[in-house]
Amino acid sequence: MTSTAKIVIENQETELPIIIGSEKEIGIDISDLRSKTGAITLDIGYKNTGATKSDITYLDGELGILRHRGYAIEELAENATFLEVAYLLIKGELPNIAQLSEFETNISRHTIVNEDMKNIFNAWPTGSHPMGQLIAMISSLSSFYPESIEPNQSEDVKELNVYRLLAKMPTICSMIYKKGLGHPFIYPKNKLDYVSNFLNMSFKHVTEDYAIDPVMVDALNKLLILHADHEQNCSASTVRLVCSSNANLYASIGAGVAALWGPLHGGANQEVIEMLEKIKADGGDVTKWIDKAKDKNDPFRLMGFGHRVYKNFDPRAKIIKKACDEVLNKLGINDPTLEIAKKLEETALKDSYFIERKLFPNVDFYSGIIYRAMGFPVEMFTVLFALGRLPGWIAQFNEMRMQKQPIGRPRQIYSGYTLRPFVKRGDRKASAK
Ligand code: CMC
């Protein structure tokens, strides 16, 4: 393999360095292209642009491979706890017993949110979307911890910000859920593990006991692991871009949550259940809905299907589909939308439209059915995705800072008017719109 690529622009040949990744991926380093040739590259939607080198996650969309720091997602989901995976993503290695225990203790010391934060909830109307609340709550942590704003922090302050965010996230997410019900908040119980504590804060009623179901703990632990990182996706890239301006951790991750909310990204998990319910209410004829998804004049898309990088299968979806069956069986729940989802998948996977375009179920296709079986309302689904993705965002943020990467600032090909003379107000014709 040569170490340079050649590009010819108007008979002028320029050599560009080739960067090889640890899994032999090839990247052409075009950072000097403009200074050498005057040209930029155009890649709308960043479909073929590597924005960074990263040690965190490896993904091969053709082979359906997902690994964090070298460990296969299948093994992590089967054997690890969510906080072990968080440690792995953020610190780079799996923790030993003492390291994990210290990590868990540090997190458990910061689970309570400042009482003043409760006032923010008072301002929102009951029924406002949980994701809008989550964006605001995470960003507002920078107001409660102003030392987080300074870009040149000591290692201790950096670490404290990370512990605070990891610790307060389940508390904030459960407060958002309780706010939706109009119920009083439940305080964290630090003797509980991370996932059990979150379930307790969400499902314990202030007047009654709540028995934490180990089936739910296992299922949520797995789901959080499966969402923990996904390299340079829309929200992680947003976190990195915001971070690149030296904005603080809470602001950067608040922005990542905003990116996640969209229905083409994490918001798809809410859309999937709404779609399955619509199909059920419509009589359950999946072929009718598949035809709608194929019709280019119909805006309907099969939600939870397709992926920018996975072109064979999404390894997370495989694990979640299996978990979905297991959890519903163990909880004794018969959810007719699961049957519709399976029929939809089976029919789509035989259809040439989906085969040719390599469209498969993604992580969001079956996850909502499990979240619903646990008792969460659909509006909370993307919040649960965010809870799982948090360690990934933190790892991406830290890596940006550690590598001292420059501010992110893409270029453009301008396609508007060329220079034209200014027209005085009275002489202007009505503009097109
Ligand atoms: N239903 C019907 N057609 C689809 C779908 C779908 N879900 N997804 C893609 N297509 C078609 C699309 O119309 C296009 O067809 P054509 O070549 O004839 O124009 C072709 O497949 C390629 O699609 P694209 O939109 O150019 O692909 P993309 O890489 O830009 O978008 C995607 C990827 C995930 C946004 C898209 O597949 C989609 O909208 N899926 C539904 C939303 C969804 O489930 N999102 C969650 C993604 S996984 C969670 C996460 O990590 O965010």
Image (cartoon, rainbow, N blue to C red):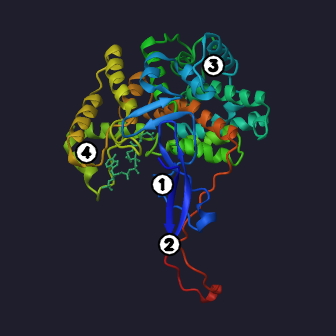
Which amino acid does the dot numbered 3 rest on?
A: Tyr
Residue for point 46% across, 28% down: 226
**Spatial CA span between label 4 and label 3:** 49 Å
Q: Is residue 151 visible?
A: yes
In this rendering, is residue 320 above or below 216?
below
Between discs 4 and 2, the one toward the N terminus: 2
Numbered disc 4: secondary structure: helix
Q: Is residue 123 visible?
A: no
Numbered disc 1: secondary structure: helix
Q: Which residue is mark 2?
A: 11
Q: Which residue is mark 4?
A: 355
**Spatial CA span between label 4 and label 2:** 41 Å
Between discs 1 and 3, the one toward the N terminus: 1
Q: Position of residue 415 (x, y in %)?
A: 52, 72
Residue for point 34% across, 14% down: 330
The reply, left or right, for residue 73 in relation to residue 31 is left
In this rendering, is residue 223 above or below 207?
below
Which amino acid does the dot numbered 2 rest on?
A: Asn
**Spatial CA span between label 2 and label 1:** 29 Å
Q: Which residue is mark 1?
A: 45
Q: Residues within 10 Å of mark 3 (few under 14, many from 20)?
A: some
The mark lying in front, picked from 2 and 1, is 2
Q: Which residue is mark 3?
A: 187
